[in-house]
Structures are given as structure tokens and as C-alpha cells.
Image: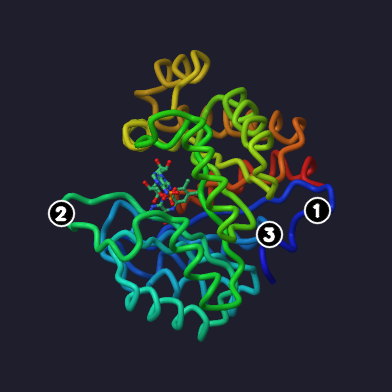
Amino acid sequence: MKISQLFGNGKCVFSCEVFPPKKNMPADTIYTTLDSLKALDPAFISVTYGAGGTDGDNITGEIASYIKNELGVESCAHLTCVSNTREDIDILLDDLKKRGIENILALRGDINPERPPKHDFNYACELISYIREKGDFHISAACYPECHIEAPDMITDIRHLKEKVDAGAEHLMSQLFFDNNIFFEFLEKARIAGVNVPIEAGIMPVVNKKQIERMVSMCGASLPAKFSRMMAKYENSPEALRDAGIAYAVDQITDLIAGGVDGIHLYTMNNPYVAEKIYSAVKGLLK
Ligand code: FAD
């Protein structure tokens, strides 16, 4: 099923994101994680592609195929273009098609100084147009409630977001954020700019201090005082920090659903325990 068909019935869509196992991790762990995530009844599970600018063999396609064809849950394969030539993208699209994958999150990808851009595609909107020409895929794209880190200002970034929608993106998933007011303000600006496709809010629960420091330095998410107090109080107590992180994510999701958000995209960090706790707390609100 195409992701665009999941929206429009007045309910908040709940989806999850996983990443392929790191090279030093046993490959099987991802399948155990996915088996556990199925119990959360996600509308779809998306799988990252070469995140951090690493090499992308098509392990993403393999995992997305497992989700769809073995678990029976809809899947979405992320695909980045900055380090791929047109021929590379053709091969990846063929592979996804053969595996029966219908949904792609089309991204530019981060610029990795060690892997110079290939320049066949400079921005995600170019990849979106290309996929649109190539096949019958549903295309999602990324959006940034606090502005993409390279964009000069929010208005410019939203103008580029609109270009992605005009090129064929039918659904957006947001960068993580910890302050819902920022997300609601972004939503208002995007709608005024004519971005009228469903926008899912990306929620990343705090699992440990290092993870949050890394994510915040990469994407520049601002931290509300309430969040910083929590980090300061529990930073040396991993279990308490995890529980506080779960409570914070539940609070954020509750408020977002009350505000009428189209969907919640949970960055699970491949941690089914945390994802399950969050889902159990909010599942009654998703109906
Ligand atoms: P774009 O939409 O191309 O935007 C990149 C920058 O260029 C922005 O500043 C934008 O304003 C600007 N821009 C866009 N079009 C133009 C134009 N025509 N002229 C001038 N400037 C322009 N990364 C991975 O490597 N793998 C993943 O699996 C992955 N998954 C992600 C999932 C989500 C939900 C999100 C939010 C991000 C994800 N990322 C992933 C990170 C993403 O690749 C980076 O944020 C990247 O830097 C931008 O990708 P984009 O597709 O948003 O780029």
C-alpha cells in the first residue's frame, strides 16, 4: 500500500523508523527488533539509507523487503542521492521495485567530506522528479521544523520544501524536535506556503545522553528548559534517564495529537523496549 493512502480518515498515523545494523553488530539483531515492533501495529516502518554519509549497499532494500514481505507491515525505504550517480539510483530503484517496495523517502543526504558529491543530483527535489519519471512509487520527503542546518532562513527552507512537494512528494516526515511550539509554528508557515500534504512529526525519545548530544549537534534541535532540567537531573542514571525520556516523548506525542497532527514518526533507535513503552502509553489516543 502506498503511504499516501494511510492519511485522510481523521486518525493520527503512527509509524516507526529503524536503521540497518552497524557493521560491527550482528546482522540478525535488526530482524528481532522488527519482529518486536510489529506488535506496535505501525502504519509503516521506514528504514534509513547510509545515514551519516556512509556507503549504501542495498541492505536498506533487504530490510524494507523483510518488513513488507515477511512481517506483513508496510515499509518505506530511505534513499539518498548526493553520493549516487544516475546509474546508481537506477540500480537501487530496480532493486526496490523487484522487492515490491512501493514507498521511498527521497533525500539529498548529508554531505560527507570524505565522499565528494557526484553532482548528478544536487538536491532532494531533483531525486524526487527523477523517481517520479522512473516508476510508480509513492514518494515522501524530509522537512525541518527548526530549519535545515544549511538553509539561510526558514522562509527559504520552506520555499525549497514546496519545490519538493511540487516535484512529487506526497508526504513529509519531520526532523526530530523537542519543543512542540516550534513544530506547530512550522506547520502553520508550511500550510501558508501551500505545502498541503500530510506532515508527520518526528519524535526521538532520549535513550542516553551521548545519543542526544550527537543528534543535537548534527541537526541543531533546540532544547526547552524542561528538557534540559531532565537531562541535568538524570544524566548519570541511565535507567532514570531512559524512563524520563519515555515520559517526555509521551508528553510530546499527547500534545501533538491533541493539536491535530497528521502523524507521529517514532525514531525507535532500534530499541523496541522504549518504542513499546511509548506506544502503550499513547495507543488509545491514536484511535
Ligand atoms: P534537501 O531537501 O535537498 O535540502 C538540503 C538543503 O538544501 C536545505 O538547506 C534546503 O533548504 C536547500 N535546498 C533545497 N533545494 C534547493 C535549491 N533548489 N537551491 C538551493 N538550496 C536548496 N540522511 C541519510 O543519509 N540517510 C537517511 O536515511 C536519512 N533519513 C532521514 C529521515 C528524516 C525524516 C530526516 C528529516 C532526515 C533524514 N536524513 C537522512 C538526513 C538528510 O539526508 C539531511 O538532513 C540532508 O542534509 C538533507 O536532506 P534533504 O533531503 O532534506 O535535502
Q: Which mark is residue 43?
A: 3
The residues tagged by marks 2 and 1 sit, at their Cα atoms, a distance apart of 43 Å
The structure residue drawn at horizontal position 55% and vertical position 78%, both measured from the top left corner, is: 135
On screen, 54 above or below 202?
Answer: below
In the rendered image, which residue does mark 2 sit on? 114
Residue type at the position of mark 3: Ala
| Mark 1 crowdedness (10 Å alpha carbons): few <14, some 14-19, many ≥20 | few
Disc 2 and disc 3 in contact, CB within 8 angstroms: no
| Quarter placement of the N terminus | bottom right
Residue type at the position of mark 2: Glu
Front residue (pair 238, 55): 55
Q: Where is residue 176 shown, x and y percent of the image?
A: 50, 38
On screen, 28 above or below 183?
Answer: below
Which-is-in-front pick, marks 2 and 3? 2
| Mark 3 crowdedness (10 Å alpha carbons): few <14, some 14-19, many ≥20 | some
Task: Name the element at disc 3.
Answer: loop
In the rendered image, which residue does mark 1 sit on? 8
